[in-house]
Image (tube, grey):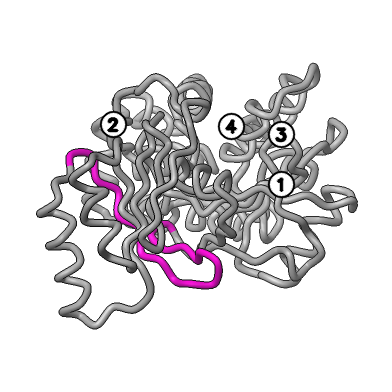
């Protein structure tokens, strides 16, 4: 199992802890604020230094220390420190409030290599290049992508000739970039929480966005707003921080039972590209850009996924055929 905040949240929830995501690095556990640190090769000295730094800056709440294995030496430190929540992902072990809990081998999976660092800016640049065949400066592309001009220059070089051709309005180059994005983009990653409601998915996102206007809709519900085609079976919402959807009538659920997935994305460019598409009136307000939506739809399953993605493709390329 990957050593991630997602994996730690899964263990905490299975242990019966009420978890609310506040941001990528902050949780609320049973009403207590918790700062999250993921460490792949920690030592007891590392943990003690982390605690010392927290005391020095007057931090409140607890420290969640997410590690591959809760070794005896780390456990020894954690059981003596009530402000530490030690989470061993591979061995399904928790220490909270000085109490050691072993959840058993049912949660242990084969360890995979840590994912490589994602070039979020490059993927955002591809989405910006596909927004229109009209030529734009690097400064404009930077604004649309939510990255610096230096990152744009680097990204154009990494994308290669297809980027240069697309900037000149080449339809074949744009088609290549569409296919490359859907194949290579790893998803927004980040932290996910899962919710259930008896309302329709469309109604669910309406409730969430009315209460939290800064959120973005993707997946089936996002596709339904841009290019309606298939029956909407679930909702996906991106948010800058974790949200307490229980106050809106939702119930926390497992991934299999959820009707709405809330994501605090690791990809920081989603809001900038969405704003660019909305400003150009090629996507409605409060909706992720069409490429993010297409990528999410492809992973929802169903016999009509390909047709739904094709409808999004046609919507994106309408401007390229004029």
Q: Which residue is mark 1?
A: 253
Marks 3/1: CA distance?
8 Å
Q: What residue lies at 75% left-to-right and 27% top-to-bottom?
A: 308
Position of residue 259 in the picture relative to residue 60 (left or right): right
Let me know if residue 30 is in the magenta part: yes
Q: Earlier in the sequence, mark 3 or mark 2?
A: 2
- Residue 298: where, in percent of width, then height? 64, 26
What label sits on residue 273 in the rendered view?
none
Q: Quadrant of the N terminus?
A: top left
Among the 4 quarters of the image, the one containing residue 157: top left
Q: Earlier in the sequence, mark 1 or mark 4?
A: 1
What label sits on residue 116 in the rendered view?
2
Q: Secondary structure at mark 1?
A: loop
Determine crowd level at label 1: few under 14, some 14-19, many 20+ residues with C-alpha closer than 10 A. some
Marks 2/1: CA distance?
30 Å
| Magenta span dominant secondary structure | strand
Position of residue 237 in the picture relative to residue 120 (left or right): right
Marks 1/4: CA distance?
23 Å
Q: What residue lies at 30% left-to-right and 36% top-to-bottom?
A: 68
- Residue 232: where, in percent of width, then height? 83, 38
Q: Secondary structure at mark 4?
A: helix
Q: What residue lies at 84% left-to-right and 32% top-to-bottom?
A: 229
- Tell me, yes or no, whether the two marked residues, 2 and 1, touch with CB atoms within 8 Å: no
What label sits on residue 256 in the rendered view?
3
Q: Which residue is mark 4?
A: 295
Q: Nearer the viewer, residue 199 or 149?
A: 199
Let me know if residue 67 is in the magenta part: no
Q: What residue lies at 56% left-to-right and 62% top-to-bottom?
A: 20
Position of residue 252 in the picture relative to residue 199 (left or right): left
Q: Earlier in the sequence, mark 4 or mark 2?
A: 2
Q: Secondary structure at mark 3?
A: loop
Residues rendered magenta in the picture? 24-41
């Amino acid at each position: 199992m990957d050593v991630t905040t997602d994996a730690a949240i899964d263990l905490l929830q299975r242990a019966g802890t009420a978890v609310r995501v506040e941001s990528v690095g902050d949780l609320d556990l049973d009403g207590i604020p918790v700062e999250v640190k993921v460490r792949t090769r920690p030592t007891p000295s590392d943990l003690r230094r982390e605690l010392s730094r927290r005391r020095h800056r007057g931090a409140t709440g607890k420290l969640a220390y997410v590690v591959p294995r809760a070794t005896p030496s780390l456990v020894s430190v954690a059981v003596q420190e009530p402000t530490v929540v030690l989470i061993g992902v591979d061995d399904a072990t928790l220490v909270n409030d000085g109490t050691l809990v072993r959840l058993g081998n049912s949660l242990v999976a084969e360890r995979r290599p840590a994912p490589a660092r994602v070039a979020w800016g490059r993927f955002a640049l591809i989405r910006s290049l596909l927004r229109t065949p009209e030529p734009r400066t690097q400064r404009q592309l930077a604004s649309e992508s939510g990255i610096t001009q230096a990152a744009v220059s680097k990204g154009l070089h990494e994308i290669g000739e297809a980027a240069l051709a697309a900037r000149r309005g080449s339809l074949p180059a744009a088609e290549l970039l569409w296919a490359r994005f859907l194949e290579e983009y790893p998803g927004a990653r980040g932290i996910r929480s899962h919710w259930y409601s008896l309302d329709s998915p469309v109604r669910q996102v309406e409730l969430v966005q009315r209460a939290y206007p800064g959120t973005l809709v993707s997946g089936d519900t996002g596709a339904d707003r841009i290019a309606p085609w298939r029956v909407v079976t679930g909702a996906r919402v991106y948010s800058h921080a974790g949200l307490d959807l229980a106050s809106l009538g939702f119930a926390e659920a497992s991934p299999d039972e959820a009707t709405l997935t809330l994501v605090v994305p690791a990809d920081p460019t989603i809001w900038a590209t969405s704003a660019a598409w909305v400003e150009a009136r090629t996507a409605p307000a409060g909706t992720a850009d069409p490429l993010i939506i297409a990528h999410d739809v492809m992973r929802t399953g169903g016999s009509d996924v390909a047709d739904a993605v094709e409808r999004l493709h046609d919507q994106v390329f309408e401007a390229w055929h004029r």
